Image (cartoon, rainbow, N blue to C red):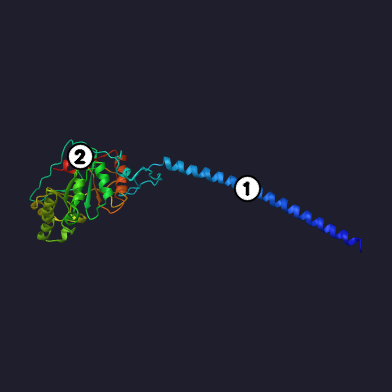
Amino acid sequence: MSESTPRTRAQRRRSRQIRLSITASVFLAVVVVLGISLTNGKASSASDSAGVVRDREVATATPEQDKTPGKDKPRTTSTPKATSTPDAEVATDPQVGIAPEPTSATSVNAEGGLVPVISQVKTTDRVVFLTIDDGYAKDPAFKEYVVANKIPLTMFLVSQAAAAKPSFFSSIATVKGSSIQNHGVNHSSLRTLSAAGQRKQICGNAATEKKLFGKAPTLVRPPYGAYNQTTRSVAYQCGMKALVLWSASMPSSRLYYGSGTKLKPGDIILIHFRPTDGVKNMKKLLGIINAANLQIGSLTDYVK
């Protein structure tokens, strides 16, 4: 017994040493494998990220029309974030096409004391017309973009809204082809009013705008597009030449067509003054106009 005990203890020590050696070897091998895997993973991730950046750099925002009548379906694409100064937002946009002088003008004549109703201009010139309503929202970025790019807008203003800051609209009106027109005093639905009520809205707007801007409007757009024969008669009495509706509208970021699935020469497009996204939506609309091989004309040059 005295001789076997030391041998057993020695064997136990050797066994423990062997196990520790094996454990250390296995641990080292695992560390090496994990290190290789992590290195490969980082390289793969970096490669994927580079591919995403390249995709963003070459992506373009090309508008395309939906198959559904009355709507457009802009293709969603990624674009890189602007790295230039904020002034780049108002830099001249190469997509803006401003029409030259019209080859012919549409003559508007009141018959029987009723002004004509126009929703599209009859012309073979490849032009469309941008009309913008209300004036309650006054986004400085939108004003700067429109003026910098010399985009002619026909502004149908509510006179109460215009009176709050007339200089905002006067600045836009400096663009050649732009004008300030009639949209009533407080955006009331005209066909719900009596002749006297409609006269107060239309004639009242004309008087206020002449005082604010030095020139009376000659075109009127009824709020909500709601009018009746009394509206046409009162408009004539207030010195208006025509009642202007629209054939396409862009209430926010999508363009809707009154008929068909694309813009046509002579279309009158309705947009609104908005507190935000005005520049973004305008750029999208310019892209659609450009894709249709059309230019922006001055409504008052074509309707006289």
Disc 2 on helix, strand or loop? Answer: loop
List the single residue furthest toward the bottom: 1
The tag earlier along the polypeptide, 2 or 1, is: 1
Q: Quadrant of residue 174?
A: top left
Q: Position of residue 78 (x, y in %)?
A: 41, 45
Q: Position of residue 6 (x, y in %)?
A: 88, 60
Name the one closer to the observer, 222 or 159. Answer: 159
Taking the spot 27% from the left edge, 48% from the top edge, the residue there is 142
Q: Is residue 304 left or right of residue 68?
A: left
Q: Position of residue 295 (x, y in %)?
A: 25, 39
- Quadrant, the C terminus: top left
Taking the spot 75% from the left edge, 55% from the top edge, the residue there is 20
Residue type for callout 2: Thr
Q: CA distance from mark 2 to mark 1?
A: 72 Å
Circle 1 residue: 35
Residue 257 visible in this rendered orientation of the protein: no
Residue 8 visible in this rendered orientation of the protein: yes
The circle drawn on residue 294 is: none
Residue type for callout 1: Gly
Taking the spot 66% from the left edge, 50% from the top edge, the residue there is 31
Q: Position of residue 247 (x, y in %)?
A: 24, 48
Circle 2 residue: 123
- Quadrant, the N terminus: bottom right
Taking the spot 67% from the left edge, 50% from the top edge, the residue there is 30
